[in-house]
Image (cartoon, rainbow, N blue to C red):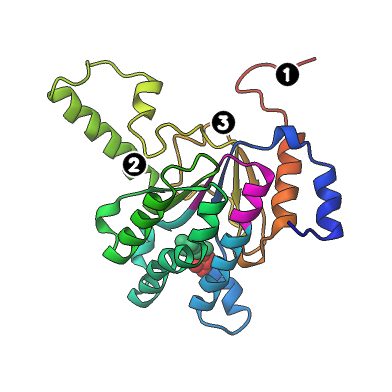
């Protein structure tokens, strides 16, 4: 991995043994990035895919174990059809060019979200990516597509009720048994959430899983987010004290 002097400098101040295991990202600001350049919104999304490429490669290089990217929310269907169609072409575009490298780098592709409403083009591309990387044991690259956290929770409750009716489970619920019904089953909760685009909210992303995550916000638009910013976020993360409700260590 070729790094600039500035990136090397920040990297040298990071403890490589304390890299956050699971990083989640809300990739916001593509539209504004494009507008500021007098370009159509699609140009912002296209540039956003370039950032995805770089962030995935670099996350893997740093030893992040799972990377969850919010690529399309259940609310994004409210956008004009033209923009939706463009956004729906991106997973295929990305995977077409990156799949060989993802396979080589031992990255495992995974999907979270309601697949049923996704166009066949997206489902096929993701299925192909999951199939081709299914045996990989390295970083999990988790695409949140047609994802909404409230929907995820309601769906988990429905699935539990179905299993209860069919006698597969008892009428008992624990945090652990409930979490197994979420899309993130088997994944650790995110240690760090990064949101670009200058908004300070969670926007129906991983409401259950973010309970104890460190949150890192930046006004940068997603297409402007780069290695140096991921390093800064990790550096900040390492300076925070995660207490999980306990009292500080003295
Ligand atoms: C929010 O920015 C971004 C999205 C709704 C889409 C994010 C998608 C990508 C970054 C590309 C995904 C890549 C792959 C490979 C699936 P916005 O359009 O709301 O920006 P704005 O708030 O400035 O209008």
- Judge whether 35 appears above or below 123 on screen: below
Whether the residue under disc 2 has CB within 8 Å of ligand 1? no
What kind of element bears circle 1? loop
Whether the residue under disc 1 has CB within 8 Å of ligand 1? no
Q: Residue at x 59, y 85 (%)?
A: 38
Camera-side mark, 2 or 1: 2
Cα–Cα span, label 1 and label 3: 15 Å
Q: In the rendering, at what x and y percent does residue 143 appear?
A: 45, 52
Q: In the rendering, at what x and y percent does residue 139 appear?
A: 55, 43
From the image, which quarter does the N terminus lie in? bottom right
Q: Is residue 147 visible?
A: no
Q: Which mark is residue 194?
A: none
Residue at the far bottom in the pictured view: 38
Choose top left, top right, bottom left or bottom right for residue 192. top right
Q: Residue at x 51, y 70 (%)?
A: 45
How many C-alpha atoms fall within 10 Å of the one at disc 1: few (<14), some, or many (≥20)?
few
Tell which of 99 and 6 is nearer to you.
99
Tags 2 and 1 touching, CB below 8 Å: no
Magenta span of residues: 55-69
What kind of element bears circle 2? helix
**Mark closest to the chain's N terminus, 2 or 1:** 2
Give the residue at mark 2. Answer: 152
Whether the residue under disc 3 has CB within 8 Å of ligand 1? no
Q: Is residue 56 magenta?
A: yes
From the image, which quarter does the C terminus lie in? top right
Q: Which mark is residue 212?
A: 3
Judge left or right: residue 124 versus residue 42: left
Cα–Cα span, label 2 and label 1: 34 Å
Judge left or right: residue 51 versus residue 181: right
Q: In the rendering, at what x and y percent does residue 237 appear?
A: 71, 38
Give the residue at mark 1. Answer: 248
């Amino acid at each position: 991995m070729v790094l600039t002097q500035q990136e090397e400098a920040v990297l040298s101040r990071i403890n490589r043994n304390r890299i956050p295991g699971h990083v989640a990202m809300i990739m916001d600001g593509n539209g504004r990035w494009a507008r500021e350049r007098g370009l159509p919104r699609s140009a912002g999304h296209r540039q956003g895919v370039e950032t995805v490429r770089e962030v995935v490669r670099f996350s893997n290089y740093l030893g992040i174990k799972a990377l969850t990217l919010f690529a399309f929310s259940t609310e994004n269907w409210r956008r004009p059809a033209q923009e939706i169609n463009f956004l729906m072409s991106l997973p295929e575009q990305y995977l077409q060019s990156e799949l060989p490298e993802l396979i080589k780098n031992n990255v495992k592709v995974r999907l979270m979200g309601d697949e049923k409403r996704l166009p066949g083009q997206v489902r096929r591309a993701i299925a192909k990516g999951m199939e081709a990387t299914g045996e990989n044991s390295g970083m999990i690259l988790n695409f949140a597509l047609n994802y909404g956290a409230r929907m995820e929770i309601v769906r988990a409750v429905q699935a539990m009720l179905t299993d209860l009716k069919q006698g597969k489970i008892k009428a008992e619920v624990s945090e652990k048994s409930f979490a197994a019904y979420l899309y993130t089953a088997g994944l650790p909760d995110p240690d760090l959430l990064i949101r670009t685009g200058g908004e300070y909210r969670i926007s129906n992303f991983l409401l259950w899983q973010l309970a104890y995550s460190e949150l890192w916000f930046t006004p940068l638009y997603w297409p402007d987010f780069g290695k140096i910013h991921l390093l800064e976020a990790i550096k900040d993360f390492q300076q925070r004290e995660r207490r999980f409700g306990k009292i500080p260590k003295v």
